[in-house]
Image (cartoon, rainbow, N blue to C red):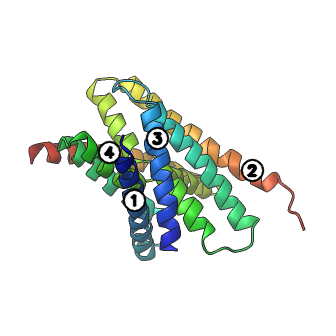
Amino acid sequence: MSPAVVLAIGAIGGVGAIARFLLDGAVSSRLGRRFPFGTLAVNLSGSFVLGFLVGAALSERAYDVLGTGLIGAFTTFSTWALESHRLGEDGQLRLGALNFAVSLVLGVLVAWAGRELGAAL
Amino acid sequence: MLVAIFVGGFLGAIARAGMGEWLPHDPGTWPWATFAVNVVGAFLLGYFTTRLQERLPLSSYRRPLLGTGFCGALTTFSTMQVELLGMLDDGRTGLAAGYAAASIAVGFLAVLVATNLVRRTRVRA
């Protein structure tokens, strides 16, 4: 990875983090914060797009920047784990487990759908 | 605040990409790089969030910088899903199930340990 690609990953990763913050806020303000719908929306849309990028067979450099940089930073594992833990702490153990299960199953499914679409185009 | 998220995201994304270079991943094997950044990121987010909410005075930039920016971008959900998809393609269902279960279990445990670590520390006057 050249220094230019590393810098590009950082810069576009910063943009991905801001995009996550904005989408999370928009979804949470509409659907409420009883269940972490914002993070779910971020992670599922990002998994779809990353699947699409894999299916579209980008060059290695383009995938490093768009896939690893943008979508990698846009989606988040740590918030997913934290929100599931906090749901459990608030006595919503079932919702926490549901958050893990639903994200995981739908995540693989949309990644597959995105990859099919990327390969077909 | 957006600047703090950007700076954190910049550093987190580069750290994750660096880990990916250091521990390259062959399809069909355990993705150590993604697993490591996700577990470490979950631990750090649990630590930062608990400390910032329950221990430190209100700050306008720390949570966006460290939590939303750095930990959010250091960890990744989408890469994990694509890795799982690749394992399922290869018929390695056991590996996929093990990777998913271990990521969730160890990620959850990391948040739990970090949270309790902060709460056990006495509040100084």
Residue B18 - label? 3
Residue furthest toward the right? B125
Chain letter of disc 4 in the image? A
Q: Name the residue type under label 3.
A: Gly
The residue under label 1 is: A11
Confirm or deny contact between disc 4 and disc 2 (CB under 8 A): no
Residue in the picture at 49% in, 36% down: B35
In the image, is B112 to the left or to the right of B91? Answer: right
Please, which residue is most extreme toward the left here? A121
Q: Residues within 10 Å of mark 4 (few under 14, many from 20)?
A: many
Disc nearer the start of the sequence (2/3): 3
The CA span between labels 1 and 3 is 15 Å
Above-or-below relation of A9 to B58: above
Looking at the rendered image, the disc whose residue lies closer to the viewer, 2 or 3, is 3
Read off the residue under disc 2.
Answer: B116
Q: Which residue is mark 4?
A: A64
| Marks 1/4: CA–CA distance | 12 Å
Instruction: Using the rendered image of the protein, determine whether residue B8 is visible from the camera's viewpoint.
Output: yes
- In the rendered image, residue B103, in percent from the top left (x then y), is placed at 51, 38
Residue type for callout 1? Ala
Mark 1 or 2: in front is: 1
State the SS at label 2.
helix
The answer to which quarter of the image holds residue A109 is top left
